[in-house]
Amino acid sequence: MIRRILAAALLVGALVLSACSGLPTSGPVNAGAPADGTPTTPDFAFRPNSPQPGATPEQIVAGFLDAQTSPENSWRIAREFLTTGFEAQWQPTAGVTVDQPGSRRTVATEAEEEAEITLTVTVIADVDETGAYNVSEPAESILPYTLEQENGEWRISSAPEGVVLERDFFADVYRPYSLMYYDPTWTSLVPDVRWFAYRSQAVTTWIASALIGGSPSPWLAGSVQSAFPDEVALAGPSVTVDSRGAAQVELTDAALQATPETQSRMQRQLEATLRSAGIADADMLVNGTVLDVLPAPVQSTAIEPWPLVMVDGVVGYLTGDGLASLGSAMSAEVAAATPDALALGRAGEVAAVRAADGVVSRVTAEGRAVVDERAGIVSPTIDAEGFVWTVPALTPAALQAVGADGVIHAVAGAWPLATRVHAVRVSREGTRIAAIVSEAGRDWIVAAGIIRDAAGVPVSLGDQIHVARLDASGYALDWLDDHTLGVLVRTEDTTRVLTQTVGGLGSATTAPLGEIVMIAAGSGVAVPRVLDAEGTLFTRRGSTWTQAATEIQVLGTQVGG
């Protein structure tokens, strides 16, 4: 019997301003709210002070750093702290150094006409010139500033390129945008998250330039592709948004040489990319004339909105009307494997199942085939092509994938620095794999692109990126959407649920009381479901965990589509 618990939803909004002179504002281009209505970073701008008469070198550098929170008009206020000669040379878009709050120390050396300020910061992440966010172990970095007298006032004559922002201010100045690329089959779109100063008037141009004139992040380069030919570039100095809310993207003449199919894919890729900036439509133009093309169709990666569960030996979706079975044959085959972990493939036609004895099988309505009997296999994952992925916890390099033909394919390049792997999940479109691994005694969330051969068989993993450093033990994860992971992290006295952007920031909430054993994507964007050891299923809305059902034996994950 399933006991459903219905609860009213409570929506609570909170705005916390935690920096210098933050005032609510509105702007022409802002990131839209996620589809589930989860609040985003509040929309406000910093109003830093200009240089004050008689300011000391230390005060000028401090004011310059403070002014870097305001990117409006190409960091106009920050440039007031620079000498006339250096003002045009300083490149704030060269990158971002993200430092740990409270870590800054300065040493000043002052002469009559020149001064030097050495700033020491503890760097925890950086954003490179392409907008890619990179997390790292905390490490001290020394940043030098030289000042000169100009018109009787101290001004900075040399400084590091880029801007320096404390972690607590970073998300108030920069926001994530998804450059969208295609998988190798031109079937699905894959996000490549980049960070840009969202209040800058140039943000739309930066996004379009990064897509059309740039390339995928190195860790994704072997796993995705762009429809834009190398010869095609932005022709205009900027991308504008017209009165209809449509971006006007002027391209070079080479766009006319692309085939209609390629133009159609370009249109889809561009529209999907700009949508992350809240722009609903885009026109591609050549010499002022709009290209009349329709966006190419793409495969959806949306999952079923209902939880995939096993109850009383029946596997199916837990709907508002009860349990909707996967189909008698498929449900019976999965249940017969006595699963303690379940991953359902595309269209529900194939599943990866780990039995209570640790044996992993590939299951269809026609039957079951054992794919891995090695000891200590972590919860298996399945990709959009139906390959079942398995790896022993204590042998991270022994990652393998097995398809419908039963052939075992060793996947090279798996987590070369890891001593243990705790959990793995392939993304819904099959181009990326995320994992929780132990490296040098610390747990990390990592990700890598999947490299396949011409037949779609997984061959190796690309370069690994560190997505987030965990301060406790991570043990389970799932893709909540195309760029967000839900991760279970266990401390001595509680369990936390981390919602982590791949290529960005994360946030943690306390899980429901009890021993939480499984996590899976929910029905909304970046919304998790969790299951405790007693079989109670919880879902999260806003700041509240709601009990959804009891007597659940297994909570499964889904590929979708």
Image (cartoon, grey):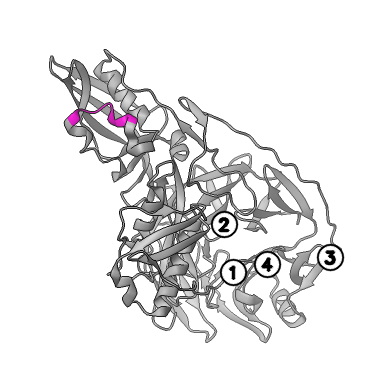
Q: Residue at x 19, y 29 (%)?
A: 84
Disc 3 vs disc 1: Cβ atoms closer than 8 Å? Answer: no
At label 4, the amino acid type is Glu
Separation (CA) of disc 1 from disc 4: 9 Å
At label 3, the amino acid type is Asp
Mark identifier at residue 304: 4
Q: Which residues are magenta?
A: 77-84
Disc 3 vs disc 2: Cβ atoms closer than 8 Å? Answer: no
Who is closer to the viewer here, 208 or 180? 208
Picture quarter containing residue 355?
A: bottom right
Separation (CA) of disc 2 from disc 4: 18 Å
What residue is disc 2 on?
Answer: 477
Q: Closer to us: mark 2 or mark 1?
A: 1
What residue is disc 1 on?
Answer: 559
Separation (CA) of disc 3 from disc 1: 23 Å
For label 3, the crowd category at 10 Å Cα-Cα, with few meaning under 14, some 14 to 19 and many 20 or more, is few
Q: In the displayed structure, would residue 535 be above or below residue 56?
A: below
Q: Secondary structure at mark 4?
A: loop
At label 2, the amino acid type is Leu
Q: Residue at x 44, y 63 (%)?
A: 283
Q: Earlier in the sequence, mark 3 or mark 1?
A: 3
Q: Earlier in the sequence, mark 2 or mark 4?
A: 4
What residue is disc 3 on?
Answer: 321
At label 1, the amino acid type is Val
Q: Residue at x 55, y 43 (%)?
A: 507
Mark identifier at residue 228: none
Q: Closer to us: mark 3 or mark 2?
A: 3
